[in-house]
Image (tube, rainbow, N blue to C red):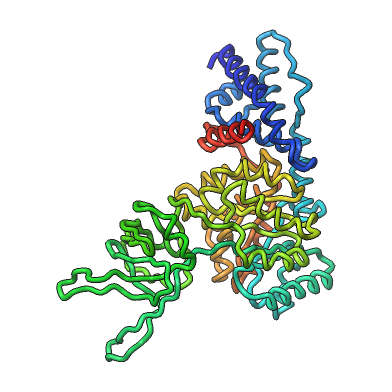
Amino acid sequence: MKIENIEKELEKIHQDLLDIEPLARKLSEPVHRDYSLSALNLVRYISLRNYDLRYLHDSLSELGISALRSSEAYVWRNVTDALKLVKLIRGESWSANSEIASIGYKKSKKLIRKHSNHLFNARDQKHRTEIMVTMPAEAAEDRNLVAALITEGMEIARINLSHGDLDEWTRTVTNIKLASRALKKPCKIYMDLAGPKLRTGLIAIKSKDKKGKTVMEDHILLSNGDHLVLTKGPEVSKKARYGKSGELKRPARLAVSLPSIIDDVHVGDRILFDDGKIEGSIIQKSKREVEVVIRNTPRKIKLKSEKGINLPDSDLRLPSLTKEDIKNLPFVVQNADMVGYSFVRSARDVDQLYEQLSAYESDSLGIIFKIENKEAFDDLPLILLNAMRRPAIGVMIARGDLAVELGAERIAEVQDQILWICEAAHVPVIWATQVLENLSKTGKVSRAEITDAAKSARAECVMLNKGPYVVDSVRLLKRILFKMESHTTKKKSTMRALVMAQKVLMKMKEQING
């Protein structure tokens, strides 16, 4: 690219940033003062990512000018500095508009660190990335286990409110606090609200074994071509019935945990069971049930009770906060440093949680927005702008659910895009799902797990799941983080245009214009 064309392209981007500035200022008005500059930068970044910048920053690099690959956290300064240098090479003098609030590289790093320390209630430590561990049920009884985890490097203990009960959670909290106090090592407490859990209903099917004895089966076998009817229930599960010639006389039947989803789905929508192990497509629908044909499942797989259901193509009208979540909020506010908000889909869902929290003294409570579905990913910038009304916020990349919703082949791309958006907003990120999973469960680690754990150093926090060898996982992860943080910080990308940015920018303008 000729230098005059580089200059023209940068001038166009610069003008777009000037044009978007009134919108950025309007959108940043409601946010907490700690995030006022961050909100401005986020809107600027969305504007920037409407461009395919790959050829431009390659040409800038040829001129020895810092390209736009790492502009997330300080967009205005990055673009104006690049334009100024190009003009100087061409013998022109130029300076940026001094009235535009500007963030530089050092300021952006300080903002991200400040927000991270505020969220995690942490002092600056030897390594930048915090380690979170999901507490097993044994943590309610075994204080030594909790102490071992803290000793090896756990800084945040996660309690999943989808499992257990108030008594178990209370005993776990007590053990965490006592172990932390005894070791004189701080350990924060994070609690996940359950959210609406769409799962398979109870499967208990009477059958005959080879000796003719009646037994109860706890599963339905499914593979390509099989049919399954999902009902609003309550209904006893039934397996498929076939004629003497093998023809299907009655599909297997099964109730779902949230009957209202039957109303929201449509013929043609995809449906996935048990973390995507079984895939199907809805082929018929009535008032109380839908019929599914199984696809992309070449071998027989057991579908059991209480297994997750994902509907990536469906617009589900489910509340992000359930009655059970609201009931648990007083316990969370009293005992947790952070709360995980499950099943967030839009900026409106932020309002629901904040309205509930307004009834309590919860200003110090950190809020983690779990990005685990397509809707949340598509609207992430808008969710963040609304979330910035509070000073202690973060994002969890729930890679397992996202992989099911968006397809496993997209998860690498999606997790990077979430990191970029959050860096632009100076919002801390928790890297979650299956980090060192094999090691935690079996005591053996794979090379692929090491590579994945190393990549997690780009986030402000990494979450490990429970397992018999989770103490070993914490020990190894701490060593990996120490090594990787001296080599890398965040990332560089090729910066092609983002489809998300184009759609979000339109929504931002619609929001302001009413």
Observer-nearest of 488 and 45: 45
Tell whether 214 sits left or right of 404: left
Residue at point 40% right, 75% down?
235
Q: Quadrant of residue 433?
A: bottom right
Report whether 317 appears left or right of 290: right
Q: Nearer the viewer, residue 500 or 322?
A: 322
Q: Nearer the viewer, residue 500 or 152?
A: 500
Q: Tell me: residue 111, above or below residue 275.
A: above
Residue name at image x 66 percent, y 16 percent: 86
Return the x and y of residue 43 as percentages of the image width and height.
65, 33
Residue, x 72% and y 27% (percent of image)?
Answer: 77
Compared with 166, 421 (above or below) is above
Picture coordinates of residue 389 (x, y %)? Answer: 74, 45
Q: Quadrant of residue 51?
A: top right
Q: Quadrant of the C terminus?
A: top right
Quarter of the image for residue 158 reads: bottom right
**Rendering coords of residue 37 (x, y %):** 75, 35
